[in-house]
Amino acid sequence: MRAVAFAACLATSTTLSHAQPPMTPRADVPTPVVRGWVFTPSLAYGLSWDDNILIQGRGEDTRWDVMNAVSPRGGLDYRDRRTTFSAAYDGTILLYSRIRDLNAYDQRGTLSARRLLSPRLTVVADGNLAISPTTELTEIIGVPFIRTGARIGGIRGGVEAILSRSTVLTAAYTAQAVSFRRGQQEAANALRGGHSQGGTAGVRHRLSARTALTADYDFQHATLTGPVDPAAPTGTSGAGVPGADDTFDIHNGAVGVERRDSRLFTYSAALGISRLGVSSAGPARTGPMWRLGLSRQFERSVLDLGYSRSFVPSYGFGGTVQNEQLTAQARAPLARRLSGHASVSWRRNEPLTLDDPALWSWWIEGGVAYMLRPWLHMDAFYSTDRQRIDRPGGAIARNRIGLQLATGRAVRIH
């Protein structure tokens, strides 16, 4: 969900999003910070060229096509002294010129809320749902790129508590579910899907105006369902064995430091342990986990870098992988009405079982946006998704280039 984040082109105050569909950029219009209700409708039309619409590997049937994308969107925001609420819906109608059987409707929605119960206690909640015709979403870890339907949804609810003038505690319950559409593709029917639930906790203690210590812990109990086999008895997995679903318990804990050297430069680092409990994949395993982050602002330009490594559930083939991920995002004004944006995401998924393949994935996008009118913007973009998997035909490359027009305006509801 990470292709061109159109909001980053419209306003330098909006962060590049990795929750965007890979087929077309998104037309987001920034919402003003005002009290009361604000409704923001927007509409975008995009035309793009795709050199691998079937998402096939090297040496296979790689076809090109021209795609029209119509993206209606609506956002609803509310703010008062104690409460903030935000809900958004994005839909993209994908219409292909040559192979019309690939026409699809990409949908995603988000919901978030915060309520200040007291000067020291805040309740938070959020949720998201994405329905996509491909598996190229960056949120789905350890899954090969396939043109098959994917659905991912998640919820989170928790509290933020100020324990003292220098210490803040956060805690939340999380849940996620992933499923894939079954069809005639052998690779699609091998995908597993599943669900997980768990919790997170974190403490941030400020040592000075520029330095803070952090401690974080998260736990996930994941259940992965077997691939569907039509010949298998009801209530069994794809292997036809009752109760063949796999469960995993994953623990991640780390301590770190955050440092702000100036108003424009911030970096962070954390080191800890990642542990996989005993499961059907084998005995318990323990490994190091770490993460690094850097944010640099150059007047109105922004550069963000991040790296992490830990054990995570994989809803693709195996169940659990050692995940390494590197992200970089940048945006900058180029002229009075012209701005640029770019993002790169790299991920390596090493399976913890010998029978499952390793994955190397890249998501790269960039573009420029021009403000024709305060309510009308034009964006020229390029994006590419690449993946390498240890199997025949496992080198996949998909390139897209196109142009988009977007319009929208925030309306205050009295």
Image (tube, rainbow, N blue to C red):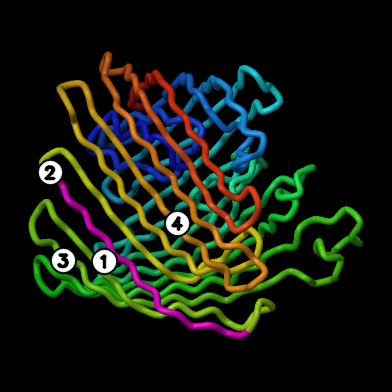
Q: Which residue is mark 4?
A: 347
**Against 372, is 277 above or below?**
below
* Residue found at x 18% / y 28%: 334
The residue lying at 67 percent from left, 28 percent from top is: 102
Q: Quadrant of residue 107?
A: top right
Q: Which numbered disc, 3 or 4, marks the residue that appears first in the sequence? A: 3
Give the SS element for disc 1. Answer: loop
Tell me the kind of residue under disc 1. Arg
Question: Which is in the foreground here, disc 4 or disc 1?
Answer: 4
* Mark 4–mark 2 distance (CA, rounded to whole Å): 27 Å
Separation of marks 1 and 3 at Cα, in angstroms: 24 Å
Q: Left or right of 319: which side holds 211?
A: left
Q: Is residue 113 above or below residue 288?
A: above
Position of residue 181 measured from the top left corner of the image (x, y, whole percent): 71, 45
Query: Mark 2 sits on what residue?
Result: 298
Does residue 100 appear to the left or right of 83 in the view shown?
Answer: right
* Distance between mark 4 and mark 1 Cα atoms: 38 Å
Residue under label 3:
259
- Of badges 3 and 4, nearer the viewer stands 4
Judge the density around disc 3: few (<14), some (14-19), many (≥20) Cα neighbours within 10 Å: some
Residue picked out by circle 1: 120
Residue 336 located left or right of residue 390: left
SS at circle 3: strand
Given residues 162 and 80, the one toward you in this image is: 162
CA–CA distance in space, label 3 to label 2: 18 Å
Q: Nearer the viewer, mark 1 or mark 2?
A: 2
What amino acid type is highlighted by mark number 4?
Arg
Spatial CA distance of label 3 from label 4 is: 26 Å
Which residue is at 27% across, 37% downward? Answer: 35
Closer to the N terminus: mark 3 or mark 2? Answer: 3
